[in-house]
Image (tube, rainbow, N blue to C red):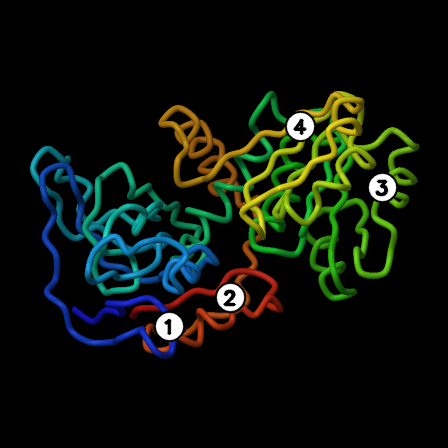
Amino acid sequence: MQAIWYERTGPAREVLIQGELPTPEAAPGEVLVRVHASGVNPSDCKSRGGSRPMAAPRVIPHSDGAGVITAVGAGVDAARVGERVWIWNGQWKRPFGTAAEYVALPAAQAVPLPENVSFAEGACLGIPALTALRAVMVDGGVIGQSVLVAGGAGAVGHYAIQFARLLGARQVIATVSSPAKAAHALAAGADAVVDYRSQDVAARVQELTGGCGVDRVIEVDLAANAGLLPRIIKQDGICVTYGSGAADITLGFFPMILSGAAIRFFIVYELSAEARAECEAVLDKLLREGRLQHAIAATLPLAECAAAHERVMGGQTMGNVVLTIP
């Protein structure tokens, strides 16, 4: 099969290799998926760059993807052959991800993909959509709440705006960094946007919420924005964070204790089986009803994997970057 892999970490154009590798087989409990689209996420690029130890001497990157099941291992219902699926955790704690014509993985990690959702869209679900949905649903959900989505034009943020709106939020505010990103967030359903490069975020949030602050912050970079929390969050509100631009976070103890705010940490790779099942059920319903916008910024062929990684890490892309594998 055709695949992209790396045998050492470093810059994309220096370490990514394209070539032929043996097609894997489905082991007991696994399915073999013919991959049609492979999602490229920042965590994939950071791993290739050396942010964590390699899972094996050779790694095929990317955790997200979509395709068709072509074979099943022992213990898996043979009726799944021919099923369209989307994939999660393809390369999490495993050596071979979705940047290849085929991937073999546990059957539960290949989720039925509704017919009205394209493979490219399906390749956006494992990390961006599930992260956004968990951030909206955790700790009681958002019904009747005012929600601030940090980075509302990002891959996760764009979905988070939609999920907050669809699951009952009273008000959705998003932070952005440009007029184009503001338009993108508003089109997803945000009631208002705050340009953090040109506006005082805390003052604007207080203005938009009548001086109360927001009930929930969905945070992409806690290290950068921790100082804002006591100034934007409602008394006894919650910050749900799934990312940080730095390993260490500084919080002012007295402002935070006076706010009564909670901080919920999670990483989508390590969701419990119960949390993942809950999110998958809600996501499947919304997908089948055609109620989600999928922001695909670019689709590139497998051979342009290095360019895809560079686009993702460039910081200017609005939406997901997907590799197509026809």
Callout 1 crowding tier (Cα within 10 Å): few <14, some 14–19, many ≥20: many
Vertical comparison of 317 with 93: above or below: below
Of labels 4 and 1, earlier in sequence is: 4
As helix, strand or loop, the secondary structure at mark 3 comes to helix
The answer to which of 57 and 23 lies nearer the viewer is 57
As helix, strand or loop, the secondary structure at mark 2 comes to helix
Q: Amino acid at mark 1?
A: Cys
Q: Amino acid at mark 3?
A: Val
Label 4–label 1 contact, CB within 8 A? no
Q: Amino acid at mark 2?
A: Val
Tell me the residue that label 2 is attached to. 312
| Residue at 14%, 68% in the rendered image | 21
Tell me the residue that label 1 is attached to. 305
Tell me the residue that label 4 is attached to. 142
Residues at marks 4 and 1, CA–CA distance in whole angstroms: 37 Å
Of labels 1 and 3, earlier in sequence is: 3
Q: Which mark is residue 205?
A: 3
Residue 304, quarter of the rendered image? bottom left
Q: In the shown orientation, is residue 245 left or right of residue 239?
A: left
As helix, strand or loop, the secondary structure at mark 4 comes to loop
The answer to which of 60 and 164 lies nearer the viewer is 60
Q: In x, y percent, where is residue 55?
A: 25, 52
Residues at marks 2 and 1, CA–CA distance in whole angstroms: 11 Å
Of labels 2 and 1, earlier in sequence is: 1
Q: Amino acid at mark 4?
A: Val
